[in-house]
Amino acid sequence: MSYTTTANHDEHHDHPTGIMRWLTTTNHKDIGTMYLTFSLIMFLVGGAMILAVRAELFQPGLQLMQPEFYNQLIGVHALVMIFAALMPAATGFANWMLPLQIGAPDMALPRLNNWGFWLLPPAAILLTLPFTLAMFGIGDGAIATGWTFYAPLSIQGGMGVDFAIFSVHLLGISSVLGSINVIVTILNMRTPGMTLMKMPMFAWSWLVTAFLLIATIPVLAGAVTMLLTDRHFGTHFFDAAGGGDPILFQHLFWFFGHPEVYIVLLPIWGFMPQILQTFSRKPMYGYKAQVISLWAIGALALVVWAHHFFTVGMPVPALLYFMYSTMAISLPLAVLFFCWIATIWKGSLSFETPMLFAIGWIVLFGIGGLTGLVLADVAADAQYHHSYFVVAHFHYTLFAGGMMGVMAGVYYWLPKMTGHMFSERLGKLHFWLTAISFNLTFIPQFFLGLAGMPRRIPDYALQFAEFNAISTVAAFVLGLSQLIFVYNIVSCVRGGKKATDRVWEGAEGLEWTLPSPPPYHSFTEQPIVK
Amino acid sequence: MVMHFLKKAVLGVMMTMISLVAHAEYTWNFPMPATPMAADTLHVHNKFMVIVMIIFVVVLAIMIYSIVNHRKSKGYKAATFSGPSTKSQVLWTLVPFAILMYIDFILMGIPAYHSIVMMEDTKTNADMVIKVTGSQWRWQYEYLDGEAQGIKFVSNLTTPQDQIDNQADKGKDYLLEVDNHLVVPVGKKVRVLLTATDVIHNWWVPAFGSARDAIPGFLRETWVRVDVPGTYRGQCKELCGKGHGFMPIVVDAVSAEDYTKWVADQKTKLAAASAGADKTWTKEDLVAHGKEVYVKNCAVCHQANGQGLPPTFPALTGSKIAQGPIFDAGGKLLKDSHLDRVFNGKGVMPAWKGVLNDTDIAAVVTYERNALGNSVGDVLQPAQVKALR
C-alpha cells in the first residue's frame, strides 16, 4: 500500500478553552484524550482497591478490614478495571486512531461521541459513591457480590447494588453509543481507495468489538433491570419461591460476560500486529487469516457463555456442547498467534518499549489462553472453578492480555499524540518491573488454586500462607511500578524530544503521514489509498 | 543483554513449572485424591498441563530463536513475505491448526467426555443418599436413607473469633474446623443432593474432586465415594456474603463398623434431645443452653452482645420483637412475634425450624428475652415449640 497526503497546519476556529473545551468538545482527539485519561485514573483507583485486598491477604487472620468491606473491594475492583479502565482505554484508542488510520476528518457522530464520554464519570461516581456514603453512616457500602451480581446474593444486598445497577446502565449506554459511532465511521468514512480488505487491522478488530457490544450490552442491561425489579418491585425472575430461577441470572449475565472478555481484548488484537510489523520492519503476516479469525472469535464468543458456571449442574449434552465449543475458540486464536509470530519471524527486529510490551504480551497472554483451554475441561473445571487458579488465569488474560496490551498501545502512539518522545529508559524499566512482578504475583495464585484455596475469601487456612505472602509483596511492586508509567506519560505530554511524523522507523499507515501531534482536523486534504 | 535476561527469566519460570508437574508434588498440585473422581480429575489435569506446556515451550522457543537471530542490531535484513503464497506453504501453515484440532477434540476431548459421564452418573449403584443444605454461613446435613436415615445436624465453624482477630495463636486447622463432621462409610457410593436456603453456595472438598452449587429452591446432585479413610476438609466456594470464608466442610470417612457405631451414637443423642423436649425446663437451664445455641448460630449476624450490624442485621437488645408477646390470648402463635421470626424466618433471617430442635429453639428464644440486655422475664418451654410442628 502507498499513500498520498497533504496535511496543512491547523486552521484555528473559535474553540472554547479551559474546562469548556473539554465539556463541549466534539473533536475525536480531545474525546480520545479524555477517554484515555479517565482510563488511567480509574486504573489507579482500581489498583489501589486491590492493593488493600492483597494487604489483607498478606497473612492469615483479619488485620485491616472486615469481610463486608473486603467483599465490596473485590467486586468494585473488577467493575472499575473492566468497565472504567480497560473498555475506556480501547474506546480512547478508537477515538484517537480510527479516523487517522482510515483517513477520516473525525468520527461520524461527534456529538454522540461527546455524550458517550461524559456518561462515564457519573457512572464511575455512582459505582464508588456508596463507599463514601457508608463513611457518613448512609447505607452499608458498595456492592458486595463480586462483579457478577449473582442473584439471590444481589437481591439480599444493600443499596450499593442499586448504585451498581444504575452505573452499569450508564456504562452500557455509553458503550452502545460508542459502538454505533465506530461502525458508522468505519463503514462510511474510509478515505477513497481504502477498501474493507485494505483497512488497518485495528479498524477490523473494533468493528467486531462494536458488533459484540451491540449484541450483548442490551442483555446485560435487561438482566440488571430484572434484578432491580426483583429487589424493589416484587417480581420473582430469580427467586424460586415465585417461580423464578437464580441460574437464569447467570445465563443472562454470562451471555454478556463472556463476549465482554473479547470486547476488552479484540481492540488490542487489532493494534498489536501493527506494533509487531512496525518493529519488525516487515509486512503483517496473514492479514486475511487474521480478519477471518477475528470474526470467527466474535461469533464463537456469543455461544460459549455457560462455561463460566459448569458447577451449577447442567445436563450432560449441555456440558459437552459448552466444553467443545469453548475448545473450538482455541483454533482461530491459534491462527492469530501464528500470524503474530510469523510477523516477527525473519524481520529486522528492534526492541523499543512498545515492542517489549508487545513481545511480553504474546508470551503472557499465551499463558492465559492455554490455561483457558484447560479450564474448558468440565471435569477438571470442578476443581479450578472459583479457586485461585481461575483468578490467576483471568489476570493473565485481562492484566497481561489486556492492560499490558493497552500499555504497548500507549507507548506506541504517545509520541504521535503528544509530539514528544517519552523516556525509553523509564519505559523499559516500567516493562521489566511490570512483567516480572506480574508473574510473581500470579504464578503463586495458580498453585493456591490447585491446593484448594477458594477465591473471594477474606481469610484463609494456614497452608496457603506462603504463596499469599509472595503474591502480596509482588502485587505491591506491580502497583508501584505503574507510577513510573504515569510519570513517563505526564513528562511526555509536557515536553521532551520532538517526535518526527513517522516516529518509528518501520511505522506504516495513514496516522504516521501526519505531523506529530496531528492538526486539530487531521487531514486538510483527503488522502488517497492506492 | 536485556533479551538474555528475558530468556533466563522466562525459561526459569518454565523449568520450575515443568518440574512441579513432573514430580506431582501434592503441595504444588491438587491434593492427594480420595475418590475415583478426584483421581480422574488429577490425571486429566496433569495430562493437559503437560500438553499445554509443550505447546507453550515450542512456541516460546520459536519466538526466542527469532528474537535472538532476527535483530536489526545484528544487521539482519527483513524478509518481505506477508502470507502463505505457495501451496506447500499453505499446507505447512495448516499443520499447527490440525495439531490443535487433534489436541482439542481427540487428545483432550475424548478423556473429558468419559470424565463428564462418570461425574454426572450419580445414581448407578449408589449406596446411600445425603442431603446437603447450605445456609448463611453453615452447612446442614441430613441422611435420607439406610441405617442412618433420619439423622440430621448442623455443622458450624468452631475456630474462635479471637484467632481470626489475631488475638490468639491460630490452630492447626484454622478456619477448616467444624463442630459436627459429616461422616460417611469408606468405599460406599454416596449420592449427594444439594440445596440452599438463602443464596447460592458451593460444596467443595478438593480431595473429592467434585464441586457442585447449592441453589435455593432447587436440588442439584453429585456423588462421592471415599476410598481412603481419613478426615477431609473443604470450603464453600461460591461468594455467599460476609461469612463466605467461614463455612468450612469437614468429612470423616470411616470403616463400616465405625460408621455403625457413629450412627448408634447419633440416634441416642437424637432420642435424648426429643426426650428433653417433653420435660419442663427451669429458666436457668434454658438460658444456659440458649447461650450455647446463640453463640453458635446467631452471633455471626446479631453479634455476641446482641447489638447486631444494622441495617442488615438488627440489634436484639431492646428489640420490639424480642421483647414483645409470643402467643395471643388464645395461645396461638402471633405473626411476626419473636418465636415466629426464629421459627419461620423472614427476608435475610433464616427459618430455624428445620435446623434446630425444639429444645434449642425454646432455649435460644428464652435466652434472647432474658439476656443481651433484655429482661422480659418469661420462659418458653420446648413443649410449646413442639406443639407448633
Image (tube, rainbow, N blue to C red):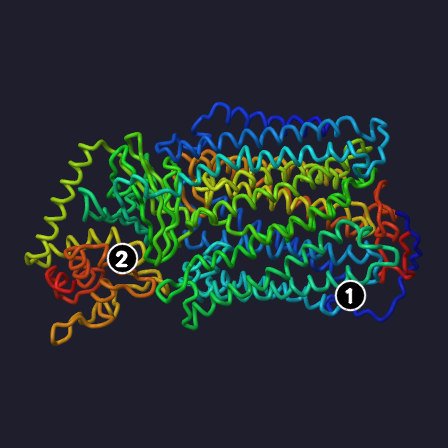
Looking at the image, which residue is at 78% across and 39% down?
A: A285
Horizontal side, residue A202 vs residue A472: left or right:
right
Horizontal side, residue A478 vs residue B31: left or right:
right
Residue identified by numbered label 1: A108
The image shows residue B351 at horizontal and vertical percentages of 26, 61
The image shows residue B17 at horizontal and vertical percentages of 54, 28
Judge by depth and name the residue closer to the eye, B97 or A402. Answer: B97
Under circle 2, the secondary element is: loop
Q: Could you tell me which chain the residue with mark 2 belongs to?
A: B
Q: Are marks 2 and 1 on the same chain?
A: no
The image shows residue B250 at horizontal and vertical percentages of 30, 40
Q: Please tell me how crowded label 2 is: few (under 14), some (14-19), or many (20+) other residues with Cα within 10 Å.
A: some
Residue A353, quarter of the rendered image:
top right
Judge by depth and name the residue closer to the eye, A288 or B179. Answer: A288
Residue identified by numbered label 2: B305
Under circle 1, the secondary element is: loop
Looking at the image, which residue is at 85% across and 49% down?
A: A512
The answer to whether residue B327 shows anywhere in this view is yes
Closest to the camera, between mark 2 and mark 1, is 1
Judge by depth and name the residue closer to the eye, B258 or A363. Answer: B258
Looking at the image, which residue is at 30% across and 29% down?
A: B228
Is residue A530 positioned above or below B336 on the image? above
